[in-house]
Amino acid sequence: MKEYSDYYISNNYDIDDKNIAVVKKTNESEAGSEQDVNDYLNLLYYIRNNDMSIHANYDKDDWFNGNNYAMWRVNEPIQFKNLFVNTLCDMKNINFKDSRVTKEVEKIRKKTSFILINENYIRYLIDEIQEEDGPVAHINKNIDIFKYWFINSKIILISQIKKLFDFKLAVEVTINSNSFINGTILVNHFNTITTNKYTDEYFTKNILYVTGKPAADKIKIEEMDFK
C-alpha cells in the first residue's frame, strides 16, 4: 500500500506540494489546513444527504481517494485540470494510437491457438457458432470488435472532454524536429517524441507543454520555433 503524502502526490502528479490538501482518518490534516478538513467533512455530509445517482451532484466532489484512510485534493484545481486533460489527450494520441493498438491486438491474434479453439467448440457442441462461419471466424470477428472498439472509443473520449470542460473543438497540433542527434522532444513532460513529425489533437484552452531535452549535459539546444 502506498503511503500518500503531499510529497508523493507532488512527485507523481507534477503538482505543487503547496497546492495539495491531504486528510487521513477523516479528521487529521497531514497537508493543508483545518479548513481543508472542514471542507472534507462537509463533503461527506453532502454525499450522505444527496442522491449521488444524479450526475450534477458530482460537481462538488473534488477529493481523490488515496487508499482506505487517506483523501487528497488540489486546492487550486486549474493546474490539476490541465494535467488531467493533457494526460487523457496523450493517452488517446500516443498510448492508444491506431497503429499501436492494431499492432498489439494482432500480436494477441497470432498467439491465439485456432486449432485448440476449433477442437474446443466441436467438443462442447456449440452449435450456434458452428452454424455461422465456424469457431475460428467467430473468434477473429470478436478480436476485430475488440480492436475497433479501442480505435473508435478515442472519438468518444475527445467529445466527452470537450463536453465536460466546455472546450471548443480540439485542434490539430504538429511538432517537427529536423534531428534527434542532440536531444529529444518531450510532450507534457513525460512523452518522448521519437519521430521527426508528430501530429495529433489537443485543446486550445489547455496549456500544451513542449520541452527540448538535450542528449547530454554539455549539449545545448539553441533554438525551438513555435508557430
Image (cartoon, rainbow, N blue to C red):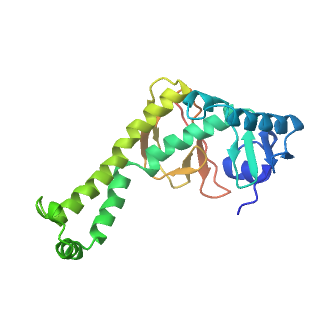
Q: Is residue 1 left or right of residue 41?
A: left
User: In front here: 107 or 214?
Assistant: 107
Q: Is residue 150 left or right of residue 14?
A: left
Residue 2: give x, y in percent of width and height: 72, 61
User: In front here: 134 or 211?
Assistant: 134
Total number of numbered labels? 0
User: In front here: 88 or 37?
Assistant: 37
Which residue is depicted at the point 55% across and 39% down? 86
Which residue is depicted at the point 59% across and 40% down? 84
Question: Can you see residue 178?
Answer: no
Q: Is residue 4 left or right of residue 138?
A: right
Where, quadrant-wise, is the N terminus in this rendering? bottom right
Question: Can you see residue 123?
Answer: yes
Residue 157: give x, y in percent of width and height: 44, 38
Q: Measured along the vertical axis of the image, is residue 95 above or below residue 222?
A: below
Which residue is depicted at the point 42% across and 44% down? 197
Residue 24: give x, y in percent of width and height: 81, 50
Residue 224: give x, y in percent of width and height: 56, 38
Which residue is depicted at the point 17% across and 62% down? 129
Q: Measured along the vertical axis of the image, is residue 173 above or below residue 31?
A: above
Q: Is residue 223 left or right of residue 139?
A: right
